[in-house]
Structures are given as structure tokens and as C-alpha cells.
Amino acid sequence: MKIAIILIPGIMGSVLEDNGKIVWPGSILELMRPYNHMDSLRKPDLVATDVIRSFSLFSQYDNIIDSLEKAGFQEGSEGNLRVFPYDWRKDNELAATALADLIDQFAASLGPDYRITLLAHSMGGLIGRCYLESGIFSNRPGFTTVASLITMGTPHRGAPMALSAAVGLEKRLFLSAEQVQEIANNDLFPSLYQLLPPQHEPFAWNRDVKENFKPEDIYEVNTAKKLGLSKSNLEAAQRFHKLLDLARRPLNVRYFFFAGTKEETTSGVQLVADGTRFSVMKMQRSYSGDGTVPFWSGSQSGIQTEPVSGEHGTIYQGRGLKLILGGLLGKRGVLATETASIEISVNPPVVNLESTIRVTINLPIGNQTLAGVIRLCRVVATEGLAPTGKRYTTNFQVNYSGPEIDHLTIVMKAPEYAGIYEVGFALDTNAEPLAKTTLVVQLAS
């Protein structure tokens, strides 16, 4: 059997255009200053033209695509690799329908000895599951060519952070918390609500001392009203959740989940009574997920699962994930080398000035010592901000000696100047980084 791949991105992971003009993602300047295309982003008829391969200094899906191409998978009309861009704002059932169309076309173009692997990041995994489990697409011509679903950081039981986003507590990439809230509560765009945990997942606890942390049902009318949630989008979420059922997965389709474990993550929320309303308090727990999706949701009982390191938005870039993924695709040792190496992640990757960040250095197993520097170097600045145009750099010394560790997390303040920073770990202040990632420090919105 030969393997072909369809890569399904997560929420916010597709380019959206309006009559040929890119609306999403925003410009490099809008990473640091307010996003100014909300009027266009509200339009319901935007066109998804590609996955986001990169933007600014951020490597996105080009990272995993490049790795797949090195392993022999190729894009193009006659290739065995396709990407699936979709309008990530809209109902995920619509995306599953578009995915079915792509699978039919792709299967028809492949030889009879090919089988398709759905390789999905974040919300993309739910779209893949909707295609496979809902029963809506079982008679489509391409359905029987799908042999496996591999998900990376998918919230199979929802993400509590989706609730904090819906009530205006989460900024995301170019969007302020208020802009995220606006899009989430637009009845035309229910996808973020479809990332909420399903109705009987006890993730929202009543904080009132008399209630003994009783779990609240956010879908119940009075509770939803106290939270200020969209009735229409809650109904869309419930409809979508009913389409997902692991017990209905096709017997001949292999499921494999990668789930993050090493980042501080919102594992649940507490609801605080404030007059006639509930406010939301996030329960953030260390080493409980990938920074967005808790491990209890990224993994599921009865499904083969690999715990991995890495921040949610770039979890697919980690060496450990790629090493196992290569084996799943019959390319062991090709997507990533067997030799262990240092990796670094920042959570959250987009913050306001002097916010708290957590920098995690992932190490080869068996390290009893670690000495070096975490270096934050501003590589892009905004006009009018001191020190304008300078490569502002700050170093934090790291010195560990003790029992064996496989990672080390340092909690620190983000820089006081807005900009895009390269965050690297080096052996000393003059050495090149052994690993690096990107941090955006924004002006307060």
C-alpha cells in the first residue's frame, strides 16, 4: 500500500482572501499594533486559498510540509500530498463537506494502490473526525480510500480555553481579546464554539463556596445567559458534537493522536457569580497540555496516543512528534533524525508588554546539568518605540545541576519593548543558539 496525505490545518490556519486581497493573516505591523481588517474579517464570503505556510518570522505549516517533501511526499496536481485550506470561522460541518470533495478528487487522481492519511492539526482533527464518524459521507466515492487519521493537538473533548475566548479573555495572533470575542459570538461563525467541551464534560466549576465546585452546564439557558454566550452558536456546537463519536469510527481506519503535555494549560474554568452574571476564572495547570489543549482532551481512552512537547500552534514542528510520525508514514528516521536535540518553546507566543511568559527547554533524556543563556533578541521593531530600530537583546542565565531532567521551564517577564523577538538557547552570550523560536510582544490593545 502506498500512502498519500491530506494536511488539515487548525483554526486560524488558512489564508482568507476578499477578491484577491489577503484579509488573514494580517501584516507584520499588525502583529504588534491593532489588526485593522475587522470589517473584512466580518464578511461571510471570504475565500480560503491556502494553508498559512509562514507569516512574518513565523514558520507555520511550511515546516511540516518541507519535512514531508523530504520524505518523498510531493504537492502538485500529480503529487501525493494535498493541503486543505478552509474558512476556519464557519461551521465545521461545512469544512467536512469541502474535505469530502477534496478526498473524492484526490482519490480519483491516485492509483488503486494508494490509501489516504488525514494529517490534522488542532481543530482540523475534529473536521477529519466529522468526515469519518458522522455517517454523512460514508457513501462518498473517496471514503474507503482513507486509511488513517493522525491528529496533532486536537481538542477531542473540547478546550476550556474556548470558553475564556468566547467571553473576551484570550488574544490570538493578530486579534485582540475583544476582536476574538466579537468573531466568536458572530452567529455566522460558530467554529470557536464548536471547540467548547461537549455538554456532559465537567470542565466549568461553580466557585461559590456553597456549591462545593459543582460543575455547571454552560449549555443550560440560564447559565449561558449569565455568561453572555450566543444561543445560536451554542446550538451549532451541540449539533456538531453529536456528529462526533469514536464508537462510530470506521473499523478499517487507524486513529493515532499526538497530545501535548509540557506546557501550562487551561485545564478547566471556575465560574464566579457576579450579580446576575458569571465571570470566568481560568484554572491553569503546569505540564497539563500544550498551552491550549489539555492532555485529557488531546488524548482519548482506547486510542493510540503519543505525549509530546511543544506549544500548541507549532506542536507539529517538534522532533519527537516527527520521529513517531515518520514511523507511522513508513518513513522512520526521515522526517526527523534519531539523534536527540535541544528544542525551545514559548507559552504564550503572543503577549503584551512585560506579561509573564514560560520558556521551556526540552532536553535529551538523561541530562543532569544544563548551563547556558536564554537570549531574547528583538529582530523587528515598531516605529516610535524606544529603542527604535535597535536589536534590543537581553540574556537570562540558566544553570541547573541535579537529578536527570528532560525539560526545564523558566518563568519570566516579557520584554518592555514591543516587537518580534527571537528566543534562543545558547551555551554562552556569544554563541549561536542551539534552538530558537519566536515571541511577539504587542502594545496593549
Image (cartoon, rainbow, N blue to C red):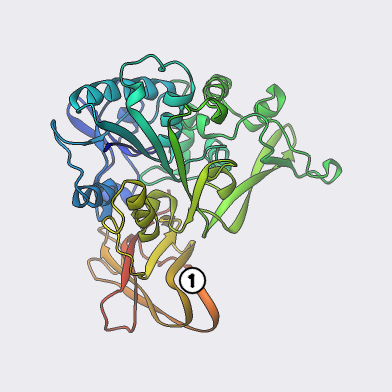
- The residue sitting at 39% across, 49% down in the picture is 313
- The residue sitting at 37% across, 32% down in the picture is 147
Residue 150 vs residue 179, the one in the foreground? 150
**Residue 376 picture location, percent across and down:** 35, 70
In terms of image quadrants, where is residue 383?
bottom left
Residue 169 vs residue 55, the one in the foreground? 55
Q: Taking 425 as reference, is 130 above or below it? A: above
* 233 to the left or right of 28: right
**Residue 357 picture location, percent across and down:** 48, 63
- The residue sitting at 65% across, 44% down in the picture is 269
Numbered circles on residues, count: 1
Inspect this view and state whether residue 128 appears.
yes
Q: Taking 432 as reference, is 41 above or below it? A: above
* 221 to the left or right of 77: right
Residue 332 vs residue 201, the one in the foreground? 332
Viewport quadrant of the N terminus = top left
Residue 233 vs residue 260, the one in the foreground? 260
- The residue sitting at 22% across, 34% down in the picture is 22
**Residue 4 picture location, percent across and down:** 26, 36
**Residue 221 picture location, percent across and down:** 69, 22
In terms of image quadrants, where is residue 212?
top right
* 411 to the left or right of 1: right
Pointer 1: what residue? 406
Label 1: how many Cα within 10 Å (few below 14, some 14–19, many 20+): few
Circle 1: element type: strand
Which amino acid type is marked by label 1?
A: Asp
